[in-house]
Amino acid sequence: MENTIITNNITKQYKKFKALDSVSIQVEAGTVYGVIGKNGAGKTTLLKIISGLIKATSGDINIQYDKINSIGTLIEEPGLCYDMTGFENLKLKSLAFGLSDDVQLHNILNLVGLSGSKRVKVKNFSLGMKQRLGIGLALVGNPQILILDEPINGLDPQGIVEVRKLILKLKNEFNKTIMVSSHILDELFKIGDKYAIINNGKIVLEATKEELQKRMERCIEVETDQVEDVIELLNQLKLNDYDIHTNQVVIRDKTLEVRALNKMLAEKCIPIDGIKYGEVSYENLFLELIGEKYA
Amino acid sequence: MLSLIKMDIYRSFKSRSTWILFLLVILLSVVLEIPFDDIRATNSVMDNIIISIQNGNILLIGVLQIVILSNQYVKNGYIKNLSGVLSKHNTIYLAHLVCSILFYTISIIFIIISVFIADFILYDNARLGANSHTIWYILCQILLLSVYSMGVSCVTIAVNNTIAGLLFGFLYYMFIDSFIIYKLVEIFKLPFDFILYGIVNAITGLNMGQDVSQYTMAVVSSAVYFAIIFIFARIFIYKKQII
């Protein structure tokens, strides 16, 4: 599959603060690309640069489409005119793009589930409706690429499901390439095909959904204050897929049983505080990747 | 560019505030027709329009309109939706200028109609008072007022404070413009009549006379001021990266 967006070593410097540091990603056409990071990690800066809202200090961006309306954006909260209806907000943008097809605007309202609120002013919309209208605005001009920054932020569970369904519909039925950022990891992992995990302006991992799922398979967690002895034992057993945290070793091996490992630790007289099966959650995987302690 | 103008006009005339300001323009012009003195009774419609322009009534309302319009795009974040079309970011200021010109044009039409009707009701006699230069006078004033309004709008966005921006607009009209021009005359030893090139002087000093040069001067003043505003907006938007 060809790449729609390729960035090469994008850096964004704000005086002494480096918001992005040599970020290189590749986004395939017709996929959902998740950008994950905690607040202030550089997600929005990356999406703003790709959208053309701000300029990178250095680095290159190659976007397959070069028409002005090839990218639809929803950055941070949607920018809406609250004293206008949803249709009027769409109309405003379509006029700016030199479009005069009202049918497309009605189709967008249908697509984002707001056709029943054509005459309602945006100030009376719920947060979820505003968010869906924001996505609708991004769709004006039928762009091939959608950049959605935190589209589910602050939504109630119903709103989250609505936005999720909409994003998947746009990918599956309209073959859009969608970049989505969020710090609600479970939700993002439900829709993405590929992910970039960003921390302090750097990409710490770019991986497909399958690659991430592999990292989350069953593991054994050993609590001990003699981590080095446990590691020595694991090396003797030729078990190399493990992570070390403060007073904890997480071992990823499908064949290894807790009972057997416990017995071996006892034979080696390695004291432990606890041993159990664990499953790496998305949050824990994320924390592990950015080098922070498990929750 | 044309698309942005269409968008701005759509936004402006879909906004309730624009129609409230039109209503205010009409009310103000009718109230000023109430016979406080004998002069009012003998003035023609055009005389009263000149008074309304020179004492800043129309300007204040027009400034409010353009400040509300341009601030709405920035404050509610709608400007982000236009990233694709705003490849030259300050083109939106040209669109705002056209919108402002349209607002003043419609306002003056409303004033002419309402003052004419008011004069007829109050004095049983309505006199337009137009001559062959009326159209040039009105066009020049619309241009000057629009450029002035754009300047205030830019400052309002730059300081990110509507009240402070409007206060600046008021002070500029009252003192600052004259002061700057006076200082330029003093520092660069310019001819004294250069002082008439200040935009506020152009607004207050323009009369419906036969002298074509004053209309040329008004257009030149408008162009110079708008160029300054345009450069200021370009630098400001680039620095702040608000779009």
Image: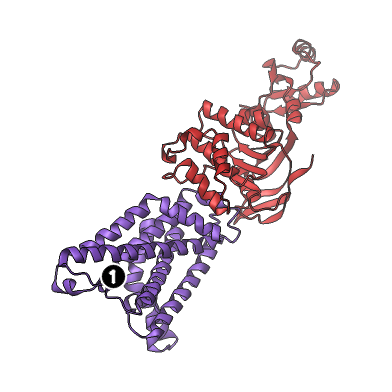
Chain colours: A red, B purple
Query: Can residue A11 be seen at all in this image of the molecule?
Result: yes
Q: Position of residue B97 (x, y in %)?
A: 46, 64
| Rendered-image quadrant of the N terminus of chain B | bottom right
Of A183 and A157, which appears nearest the observer?
A157
Name the residue: 40% across, 84% down.
B212
> Which residue in the protein does label 1 denote?
B49
**Relative side of B89 to B132, left or right:** right
Q: Is residue B163 above or below residue A117?
A: below
For label 1, count other residues whose C-alpha is less than 10 Å away and answer few (under 14), some (14-19) or many (20+): some
* Amino acid beneath label 1: Ile
Question: Chain letter of disc 1?
Answer: B
**Relative side of A217 to B131, left or right:** right
Of A266 and B48, which appears nearest the observer?
B48
Q: Is residue B93 above or below residue B43?
A: above
Q: Position of residue A42 (x, y in %)?
A: 62, 45
State which quadrant residue A270 falls in: top right
